[in-house]
Structure formats: structure tokens, C-alpha cells
Image (cartoon, rainbow, N blue to C red):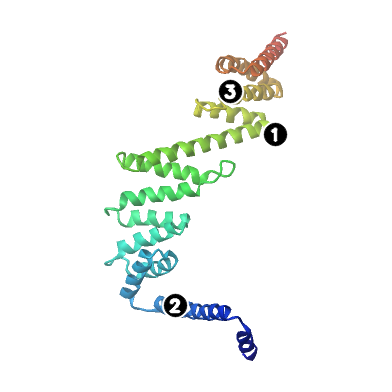
Amino acid sequence: MRAIRELFVSLHPMKKALFILNILATCLLLTGCNKFDKLLKSNDYDLKYQAAMQYYNENNFSKAIQLFENLTLHYRGREHAEEISWYYAQSLYQEGDYYMAGYQFKRFARQFPYSERIEEAAYLSAYCKYMQSPSYTLDQSLTKEAVEEFETFAERWPRSTHMPEVNRYLDEMRVKLMKKDYEIAYGYYFIEEYHAAYESLKNFINLYPEAPMREDAMFYMLVSGYQYAINSREEKKRERLQQVTNDFDRVVSGISNAKYLTEAQDIYNKTRAELAKMEK
């Protein structure tokens, strides 16, 4: 204590003023924290509700979240239950906790299906899922869930004012899913799992007829089919080589890349030669 006193005496007057202000700010902070902790532990739920709404309106969402969470069980089925559930979800949303906010908006929709906020809750639930959707290089489970929620929203509220952004988000996520599906399909080709590559690439072509990487997918499908066929057991080889010739017609009519066309023709010639050899 003496050392602190000596340090204070030695300070420049301006630094002394700053030192005092810091001490006062710390005291006020501690007093405020103690007051909030007492409020959290209090059984005066009406006071808690009023304080939670005040914190929310003051954009102090972290404290509002703690109070709304504390109030949720007490007010279940009672007056203010809908407001508490709504503003709890909104506080989480404003804090950027999209996982918990999405969960609470979905819960709100289940608990208050006739609320005037039901449309907004459904939209925000889907939007929170969209905000959790990762890069296409990662697992796309959350993206698929977000697409499903937005599609459900569009079916139920086709004239919603949110539809322009809903359609924009859906387009964005469908592109992401398309890229992921192609990455998986090409990945099988890259590691020489030709049967899996053939099936995956064929499904990709059927699912995404307008994909920008469609020509690549068609070419690698043909190559995969050929590699799978020539490495098959003898009793299966003829059938699978014949499938390569069938695929060739579809591929050459659907691609314009000169290099791909040349290599596709080479594969076709090898396939026909192998079939002719088997006939002999």
C-alpha cells in the first residue's frame, strides 16, 4: 500500500488524474457486476423481465441473453412467454451465435405456431443455418439443411417480402453443393476408384445439366467407364465395354473441348478393338 502511495505522489498531475479515473471506472464496473449477479440470483422475475428488455433495447445482448435464458422456464405457458422466447432468440442472433439462435427460432415456431412472428421466425431459423454453411470443400450437411429450410419457407410463404433474398441464398448454396458433388466425383477418379467415379460422375451430369464443369464430368465419366471395363472380370468385360461405346455417343455430342474429343475418340477406338478381339 505504501509503495502504491509513493508511486502516486511521484506521478505527473495528468497521469494522477488518469489513475484516479481508472480506479473509479474499475469500482463502477465491479459495482455493476455485483448488481447484475444479484439480479440473476433474484426471485423477482418481473424485475428480471423488465431488466432483460432494457438490456436488449440498449443493445447489451450478452446480459439480455443471461436474463432471458433464466426467465424461459419460469414463464413457460404464462404471460410474456412469447416475448421472452422471441427476444431470447433475437439476442442470440444479434450476438452472432447462429447455432443457438437458429435453434431458438425453430423452437419459437414450434411453441407459438399462431404467432404473428411465425414467418419471421421461420425465415431467421433458415438464415441462421445458412450462416453456418461452410466452404464447399468441407462437409455440406448444414448447407443441405439450410436449403431444405428455405425451400419449406418458400412453399409456405411464396409471397413473403423475404423471397428475393431466399432465392439468392438458395442459388448460392446450390452452386456450393454442385461444386462439392463434383469434387467428390472427381476425387474418385483421381484415386483411381473407377467404378465409384463412373457412377458419381454420371449422377452429377444428370443432376446438374447446366453445370459449368459438365464437359469435364462427361469426359472423366467416359475414361472411368473404360478403365473400369478393361479391368473387369472376363464375364463382365463385354457388357461394360459395350456401355463405353454407348456413353461415347452421348459424350461427343455434349462436349466441344478439342483435347477431350481427341482422347474420347481414342478411347472409343480402343474399346471397339477390344470388343472385336473378344468376338474372335
Q: Nearer the viewer, residue 99 or 17?
A: 17
* Quarter of the figure with residue 153: top left
* Quarter of the figure with residue 257: top right
Give the x, y percent position of residue 273: 71, 11
| Residue 165 visible to an observer of this rendering | yes
- Residue 270 lies left or right of residue 133; in this view the side is right
| Residue 238 visible to an observer of this rendering | no
Quadrant placement of the C terminus: top right
Amino acid type at image mark 3: Glu
Residue found at x 40% / y 38%:
167
Nearer to us of marks 2 and 1 is: 2
Amino acid type at image mark 1: Ile
Residue wearing tag 1: 191
Nearer to us of marks 1 and 3 is: 3
Residue wearing tag 2: 32
Q: Nearer the viewer, residue 182 or 243?
A: 182
Position of residue 204 relative to residue 267, above or below, is below
Q: Which mark is residue 215?
A: 3
